[in-house]
Image: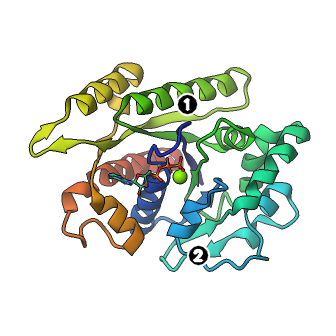
Amino acid sequence: MLTIACLSLSGGQGKTTTAVLLAKSLAQKGYTVLAVDADPQSNLSTFLESDVGEEMPTLLEVFKGTVAIADGIYATGIDHLFLIPSDDALDTVQDYLSSSGVGAMLLGKRLEAMKTVFDICLIDSPPQRSQICKSIIGAAHQILIPCEATVKGYGSLVRTLDAIKELTEIGVSQAQLLGVIPFRDRWVGNNQTHESRMCIQEMITEVGKELVFPSIRESERYKQAISQGKTLSALGAPELESPFETLVQHLTAIIEDNHE
Ligand SMILES: Nc1ncnc2c1ncn2[C@@H]1O[C@H](COP(=O)(O)OP(=O)(O)OP(=O)(O)O)[C@@H](O)[C@H]1O
Ligand SMILES: [Mg+2]
């Protein structure tokens, strides 16, 4: 199982949008995908429309080990796509993680049990630098950083790279940077706005051209695709699929390499 974290340490950077659309694209391609909602805001759980009752186990119980991980995994109604959901209560795991001493290693340890069951695990993260984020970085093999093509987005990229570096230096993370995905790249007609162009250029300077994926354009279509559970192609905008097609190709190559 290849574990990928969607991580970006500011609000509204496109983490959940990327996680939902990438998880669906991978499942459609035939991969068995485990989506993990590690954000107490639980937007991923809402968008994947898993029918999880209030008393049913979520990521909180999985983290604490009070249920077996398999009991916290639910079908989503989409073939090959499964979910460990969250809710507000997940916030209470922060104290548990900081007092456990091995908090940064815990999510990876829990996911171990699923390593032969799923091809890919995709984790959606909260926006704050928190104990949950540390555990996500600790669990990830690859980290994908969505960030807005704005000054705020560039700041989020720098903060996220810094958090990864901190955990790599102390040996808690072995994660590779899968890449950066510019979010809400604004174009007016055929012209990219000056701010988008400059900010994406800064991202390229920061991580290198080969690690910056095609951008997610500013467009209502992405929101519609998620809220209506449709593909971008079905909404008449197949060209907007490009970032996810590139990501799927890239991940396919990584998975094939791992099998060799
Ligand atoms: N292509 C797009 N263009 C414009 N807005 C978009 C696009 N895709 C998604 N959005 C909207 O941008 C907002 C932020 O996206 P998203 O929720 O994916 O970010 P996030 O990083 O997960 O946020 P949070 O840190 O709060 O979890 C959402 O309201 C979403 O509907
Ligand atoms: Mg989110």
Way the structure is coloured: rainbow
The disc placed on residue 160 is 1
Q: What percent of the width, then of the height, locates residue 39?
A: 64, 53
Count neighbours of disc 1 (C-alpha within 10 A) and say few if under 14, some if 14 to 19, many if 20 or more: many
What secondary structure is marked by label 2?
Answer: loop
Which residue is nearer to you in this view: 33 or 53? Answer: 53
Amino acid under label 2?
A: Ser
Residue 34 higher or lower than 112, as above or below: below
Q: Is residue 62 left or right of residue 23?
A: right
Distance (Cα) linking label 1 and label 2: 29 Å
Q: In the rendered view of the protein, which quadrant contains the N terminus?
A: bottom right
The residue under the point 18% across, 42% down is 187
Residue 17 higher or lower than 102, as above or below: below
The residue under the point 52% across, 39% down is 8
Residue 94 higher or lower than 232, as above or below: above
Which residue is nearer to you in this view: 216 or 1? Answer: 216
The residue under the point 53% across, 38% down is 10
Residue 169 higher or lower than 144, as above or below: above
Q: What percent of the width, then of the height, locates residue 102?
A: 85, 38
Badge 1 vs badge 2, beta-carbon distance below 8 Å: no
What secondary structure is marked by label 1?
Answer: helix
Q: What percent of the width, then of the height, locates residue 215?
A: 30, 42
For label 2, being within 8 Å of ligand 2 is answered no
Q: Is residue 107 left or right of residue 184?
A: right
Which residue is denoted by mark 2 in the rendering? Answer: 50
The residue under the point 62% across, 80% down is 51
Q: Is residue 188 visible?
A: yes
